[in-house]
Image (cartoon, rainbow, N blue to C red):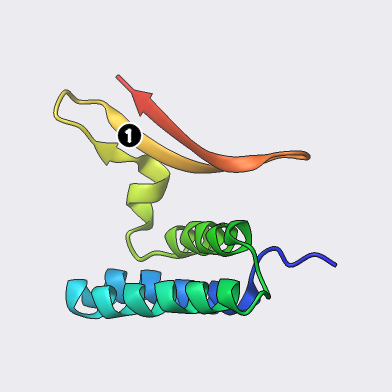
């Protein structure tokens, strides 16, 4: 049976990302610590591998970015000092997935 991704980690990770977005570091740091402890507990219990945990956090990050109130930063990119843009986009294909970082000039 497959254990990827960890469902427990998806929920906790989304809460972590949203804590950073809405409440800043005062809520983000404790949420990050709680997420790390949950990940460690899932690995220690033998229910998941490290890749299951990291994959769940990555998927949660992509989901959180796609529903952010700062969605323009995600879709239009971040302005750079020389007038270009830096765009981070999820990549999902038939046999691969990941994140692409695109730099325009």
Give the residue drawn at x 56%, y 59%. 59
Residue 91: tell me if it is visible.
Answer: no
Residue 78 percent location from the top left of the image: 28, 41
Residue 58: tell me if it is visible.
Answer: yes
Q: Relative to 14, does residue 77 appear above or below in the rendering?
A: above
Give the residue drawn at x 59%, y 79%. 8
> Which residue occupies the extreme right position in the image?
1
For this rendering, which residue is in front, 69 or 57?
57
Q: Relative to 58, does residue 12 appear above or below in the rendering?
A: below
Give the residue drawn at x 42%, y 46%. 75
Of the 4 image quadrants, the one containing the C terminus is top left
Q: Relative to 70, does residue 73 appear above or below in the rendering?
A: above
Residue 42 percent location from the top left of the image: 58, 76
Residue 21 percent location from the top left of the image: 29, 69
For this rendering, which residue is in front, 27 or 39?
39
Q: Quadrant of residue 36?
A: bottom left
Give the residue drawn at x 20%, y 32%. 80
Of the 4 image quadrants, the one containing the N terminus is bottom right
48 lies left or right of 71: right
Residue 56 percent location from the top left of the image: 57, 64
Which residue in the structure is indicated by mark 1? 86
């Amino acid at each position: 049976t497959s254990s990827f991704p960890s469902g427990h980690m998806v929920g906790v990770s989304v809460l972590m990302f949203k804590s950073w977005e809405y409440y800043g570091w005062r809520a983000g740091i404790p949420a990050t610590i709680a997420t790390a402890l949950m990940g460690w507990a899932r690995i220690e219990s033998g229910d998941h591998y490290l890749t299951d945990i990291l994959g769940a956090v990555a998927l949660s990050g992509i989901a959180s970015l796609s529903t952010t109130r700062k969605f323009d930063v995600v879709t239009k990119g971040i302005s750079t000092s020389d007038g270009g843009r830096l765009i981070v986009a999820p990549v999902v294909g038939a046999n691969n997935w990941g994140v692409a970082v695109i730099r325009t000039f």
